[in-house]
Image (tube, helix red, strand yellow):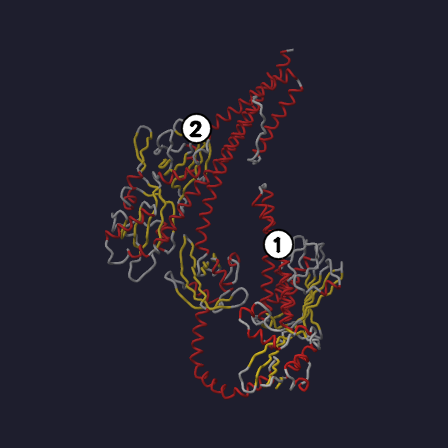
Amino acid sequence: MLALGLMPLLLAFPLVMAALSILGGGRAEDMLLSNLRSQLGASSSYLEQTRRETGHQLGQLVRSERMRALLRRDSDAKNVQRVLAEVAESNDLDYLLIIEDDGRILASDSGKSVGMLLPLDHVVRQAREGVATSAFERFGSDVLDMLGNGLQTETQVSLLEGSNLATEDRGLAIHAAAHFPLSVDSPNAMLVGGILLNRNAALIEHMRELVYPVGTLPDNTEGLTLLTVGDTIVTISRQRQDGGRLAGGKLPEKPTTALTNGADQWSGLTTFGDASYMTGVEAIRDIHGGELLGSVGVAFPYAPYERAIRLLLWAVGGVMAVTMLVVSVSYLVAGREITGRLSAIGRTMSRVRRGDRAARVSTSPRNDELELLARHFNVLLDTISMQDEAQKQSQKKIADEASRRRALFEHERDGVVILNEDGTVFEANPSAARMLGYAPDELNGVHVSAWEANFSATEIAANIRTARKEGDMIESVHRRKDGSTYVAEVTLSRVQWGDRTFILTTQRDISERKAVEAELDRYHLNLELLVEQRTRELNDRTAQLDTIFALSPDGVVSFDRQGKVASVNRAFLQMTGLEERMVKGLDEHAFASVLRARCRNPQAFEGFDAMRADDGADTDQRQGSAQRPVLEMSGPGDRILELTLKSSGSAFISQVLYVRDITRETEVDRMKSEFLSTAAHELRTPMASIYGFSELLLHRKFSDEKRRDLLETISRQATRMSTIIDELLDLARIEARRGQDFVLETLAVQDIVRLVVADYNPPDGRAQPVLSISDHPLHVRADRGKLQQAILNVLSNAYKYSPEGGDVIVDCQPDGNGQQVAISIRDHGMGMSADQVARVFERFYRADTSGHIPGTGLGMSIVKEIIELMGGQVSVSSEPGAGTTVTLRLPVVGVSNE
């Protein structure tokens, strides 16, 4: 019986150990390699950020007044050297030189090499073209000797190859250059500087602190960060346990071979000294030719993890042996408990393998082997999680720094546009896009002729072809996306970046300056005419005042010195419905009674005494109460009148009552309040979603999938709110300008309809619109862009409101005995009732109340404004369940009218 009970243990234990060794060890190594690649990415990002910062530093230095003063011809050489040394030290640069365009050294921080020729590498050539550039460069000892004192010695690293002692004397550096601004009193010079990476303890230790903060590796071990020139380690982080660095050693054969054969990265298990390390290296290549210059690497000791894995495997094996022995003795009862606990560990390992770094094995107060296994496994997972968190923090710091650098370019005040040689936009900064009325991404690929209003396509091509490196300045007129124009001052310069040629343009809006100049000219021309005009106005003033009194749109009632009505004008009689004989000669009390009788609310008019008291009160007191009486008349038209009483010092007039009709203003205020309420309601809905989901993301943790879902919801709602605002602004511009900015021209309406239909991209699974156009030529007087916008709005609605499918038919035929052209767009969608059709042009009204069809409810309002401003009409016919037909009618004009 004992042998039979031990049989499962003797047979299964070797198989279980083998499976754990293969599967568990492989999974652990996969996790370690994944973590290693993340650490290698952080090191490469830090090194790349250091390169960009170095280039940016030199770009700022060449613009500083202190550095530009060094180029003066009367500058003392010793003072120039001293200033360069101070600037190099304050900016952590290992060398700093001023050279001419041909590479001749004018000055250096070390004071040596003056007059020598520095080889013209890629960085210096770019700087000579006016582009501040930084790159990784590998220099020989002769170049290092020219760059600065001690650099040649600093790069030498002793190494042992076979039995012969040799040295690596090449230097790997972050090399940067920038061109000084051109000036008539200084030479054409560049500033060259950089950081030597060989034996750069500060840089390599900072990199190690970012990748492997102290205490993040198990057993108080330390990670390594290193740099190589070729396959020679020239810089490596200090190890407290070893007491030094392994500079001068060689990279192992596998990573060296991989990088030499063109690989960008390699990661795996290697040996440093007598210890095994998980090592990852990434190639550092020449920015111009792709030649392998060296590499950056990270490594951490494998022994602690190997011990943890071995301990884990042996612990699991031991627990399994005990478990199987107990199973053999106690059969099902003990077996079920042990199997359940092992399954929990297995499930946790599977979750970790799927990427759930928060997964942990549940523990209990027990102190048996399985519990010890679970705790060790949790410790291992906690260690890996800590390393991941430290890595994320490092990457966040690097990303934040990159964002700050990008902001400098984006906030440039002048517009900067980089053109290809064919005149299309390669890149533009936000200021340029803002000037032209485009979104930043919209300008990419757009041709200059899209906004250039002063030059033809042939002249534009000629200007690009003749552009010089020195730059040319011209004045032109630019056309914004919305059709408006402004006067621009443009500078064109030809630049060479790598093997490509670009046209660098800067743009500045000088409309205000031109307007001021024109205003001054008009002022000088009209000054004499103005003096003559003023003289005539004084002579005609009396006659004008009489005419104004009679024709004034505001009512005027004057009282004589006895307080009786002396005169009334026609506007007052029309507003109140009174006749002159009914009020003339009345004193103010009787006059007030007559007005009260005409008011809808007689108590609203308190009389002349109250008006005089309010007029005599202090300004602060008047601001705290109603300013002027407002009367709502009960006569025809329901007019609303505002009264103002003014005292007069005239010998004949004691006081004057001004009556202003504010009926339209009151109605406009009411409509504005209603519109603002509706707009606020429409904007509050997406804002509530954005606010709610943002609060959830700030205060709760979600899985990556759920977090992405929430972010997509926020993005959709933000897009909806942006669309509402854009359409509101478009509608406001159209209403405010009343077509004044429309560019009216005689157009073949069939061509416009064909273009809109051809350019329209229907939803997935839907066919193109069916086009039916008259063969008879039809011409209209319209703005091309606005007409296309109106047709496109209606066409888009036809597809949105027919989600079940069906043809969308676009018909263009003469109408009204040929006096009009009718553009009809018909769908077979859900249709509308008569009540819905009556409200279709109301702002924010949407026939669909389910919320499943996107839209803002402003499209048809915009269509109606556009078509009516061009002299046309819009009509809608619809039937629920049968579809909708929208017809745009415009007056036809003859071709000879163009």
- Residue 686 numbered tag: 1
User: Residue 448 versus residue 686: which sits nearer the camera?
Assistant: 686
Residue kind at label 1, given as amino acid type: Pro
Q: CA distance from mark 2 to mark 1?
A: 57 Å
User: Residue 561 versus residue 220: which sits nearer the camera?
Assistant: 561
Check the image and report above or below for 743 versus 535: above
Quadrant holding the C terminus:
bottom right
Q: Secondary structure at mark 1?
A: helix
Circles 2 and 1: CB distance less than 8 Å? no
Residue 679: where, in percent of width, then height?
A: 63, 61
Residue 390: where, in percent of width, then height?
A: 47, 38
- Residue 299: quarter of image: top left
Residue kind at label 2, given as amino acid type: Ser
Q: Secondary structure at mark 2?
A: strand
**Side of 771 relative to 697 (left or right):** right
- Residue 569 numbered tag: none
Q: How many marks?
A: 2
Residue 599: where, in percent of width, then height?
A: 69, 75
Q: Residues within 10 Å of mark 2 (few under 14, many from 20)?
A: some
Quadrant holding the N terminus:
top right
Indicate which label's residue lies in the foreground, 2 or 1: 1
User: Residue 554 versus residue 37: which sits nearer the camera?
Assistant: 554
Residue 172: where, in percent of width, then height?
A: 35, 42
- Residue 248: quarter of image: top left
**Could you tell me which residue is drawn at 61 percent across and 46 percent down?**
709
Which of the marked residues, 2 or 1, is nearer the chain's N terminus?
2
**Could you tell me which residue is drawn at 47 percent across and 69 percent down?**
454
**Could you tell me which residue is drawn at 60 percent across and 43 percent down?**
706
**Side of 639 relative to 275 (left or right):** right
* Residue under pointer 2: 276
Check the image and report above or below for 652 versus 725: below
